[in-house]
């Protein structure tokens, strides 16, 4: 993948959460006001704030969280471990009811200023409809994760209009940053930069298949397969006037083609301002069943009738070069023959 190191920044929040009956109208008012292209931005995190860790999808042990906890505490944050950590219901981090209850508790807990999902896997779609977002909409906090957590990014953007962070999760933190590869260090640092409120700015080297152009719009997206499965649901992503980023792993080329046909046929590609293609770890074709088209050919054929910029090999996805992105926030995308830049618009 061609790319340069990029800096990112994100805001996170403070402020206590209270929800007396007299504030119900205020919550309803906020809910109406944030259903626009401009998302509500949770407050930035500051030293001493508490970050919660929960497992809404796959299971994980407390021991596996050790490096992530140590690093986030070194950033000055307190860490609160959710009840799902260490629990296991086959592949899940506890039963559906346990995972939903743990996530809900963290949404409603006024002492928790951000929620990081411990890992991906599968399971968020099984609990998302059980969650009550009323207090979250009244007092937003950053939700952090990627892969299966795309369910939350899309659902929150569609129904709450609140910014979220697409980034690595606890299971991707290296055991020792001091001896880790630079790309690992940079991607983990990008989470801290995001939470501390620095302006996001990204630069990536060019790809010969890129389509030049300049666009401004709210950044949305995530895992392509998850986005496909959300089509037609209350969590369906809204791409109208947006810059869309997508990534995936372990899919055949024909499956990626089918997913892009879904984006095309549902009108999600037609109304874009720009398209960012991240990492795609493609499963090799079965012998005798070759698809005969590259990833770039698949995508460019779906957007050939549109004029917005398109870039490939952006450093996001199931790979070491997976930097923090702020979903729901306006960005400026510029694709040239020399480089691609993505900058948050303040």
Image (tube, helix red, strand yellow):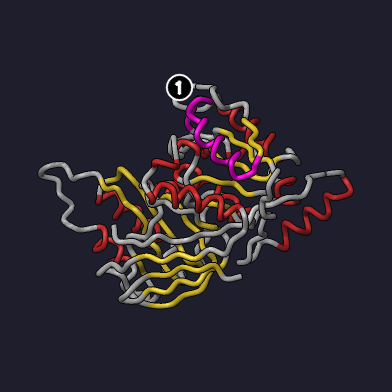
Q: Is residue 18 left or right of residue 129?
A: right
Q: Is residue 4 left or right of residue 51?
A: left
The percent coordinates of residue 69 (x first, y second) are: 56, 35
Of 115 and 105, the residue lying toward us: 115
Q: Residue furthest left?
A: 288
Report the number of numbered marks: 1
Q: Residue furthest right?
A: 22
Residue ID at (66%, 61%):
35
Q: Quadrant of the C terminus?
A: bottom right
Q: Which residues are magenta?
A: 58-77
Residue ID at (43%, 77%):
214
Task: Determine crowd level at label 1: few under 14, some 14-19, many 20+ residues with C-alpha closer than 10 A.
Answer: few
Residue 227 seen from this side: no
Quickly name the residue at label 1.
90
Q: Residue furthest front?
A: 178
Secondary structure type for disc 1:
loop
The image quadrant that residue 127 belongs to is top right
Residue ID at (70%, 43%):
48
Classified by dominant secondary structure, the portion drawn in magenta counts as helix
Residue 303 seen from this side: yes
The percent coordinates of residue 297 (x first, y second) are: 24, 63
The percent coordinates of residue 332 (x first, y second) are: 50, 72
Above or below, 132 against 215 in this view is above
């Amino acid at each position: 993948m061609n790319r340069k190191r990029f800096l990112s920044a994100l805001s996170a929040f403070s402020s206590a959460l209270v929800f007396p009956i007299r504030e119900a109208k205020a919550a309803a008012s906020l809910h109406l006001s944030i259903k626009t292209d401009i998302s509500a931005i949770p407050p930035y995190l500051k030293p001493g704030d508490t970050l919660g860790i929960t497992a809404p999808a796959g299971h994980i042990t407390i021991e596996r969280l050790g490096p992530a906890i140590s690093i986030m505490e070194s950033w000055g944050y307190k860490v609160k471990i959710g009840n799902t950590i260490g629990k296991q219901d086959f592949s899940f981090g506890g039963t559906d009811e346990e995972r939903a209850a743990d996530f809900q508790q963290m949404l409603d807990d006024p002492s928790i200023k951000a929620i990081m999902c411990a890992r991906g896997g599968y399971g968020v779609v099984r609990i998302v409809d059980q969650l009550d977002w009323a207090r979250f909409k009244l007092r937003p906090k950053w939700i952090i994760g990627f892969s299966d957590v795309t369910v939350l990014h899309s659902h929150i953007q569609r129904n709450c209009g609140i910014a979220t962070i697409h980034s690595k999760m606890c299971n991707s933190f290296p055991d020792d940053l001091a001896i880790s590869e630079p790309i690992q260090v940079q991607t983990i640092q990008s989470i801290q930069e995001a939470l501390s409120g620095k302006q996001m700015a990204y630069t990536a080297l060019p790809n010969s298949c890129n389509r030049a152009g300049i666009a401004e719009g709210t950044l949305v997206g995530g895992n392509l397969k998850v986005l496909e499965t959300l089509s037609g649901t209350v969590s369906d992503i809204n791409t109208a006037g947006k810059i869309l980023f997508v990534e995936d792993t372990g899919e055949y080329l024909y499956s990626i083609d089918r997913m892009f046909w879904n984006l095309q046929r549902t009108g999600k590609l037609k109304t874009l301002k720009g398209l960012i293609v991240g990492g795609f770890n493609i499963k090799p074709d079965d012998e005798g069943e070759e698809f005969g088209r590259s990833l770039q050919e698949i995508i460019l054929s779906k957007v050939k009738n549109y004029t917005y910029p398109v870039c490939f090999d952006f450093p996001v996805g199931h790979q070491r070069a997976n930097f923090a992105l702020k979903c729901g926030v306006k960005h400026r995308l510029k694709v040239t023959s020399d480089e691609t830049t993505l900058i948050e618009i303040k």
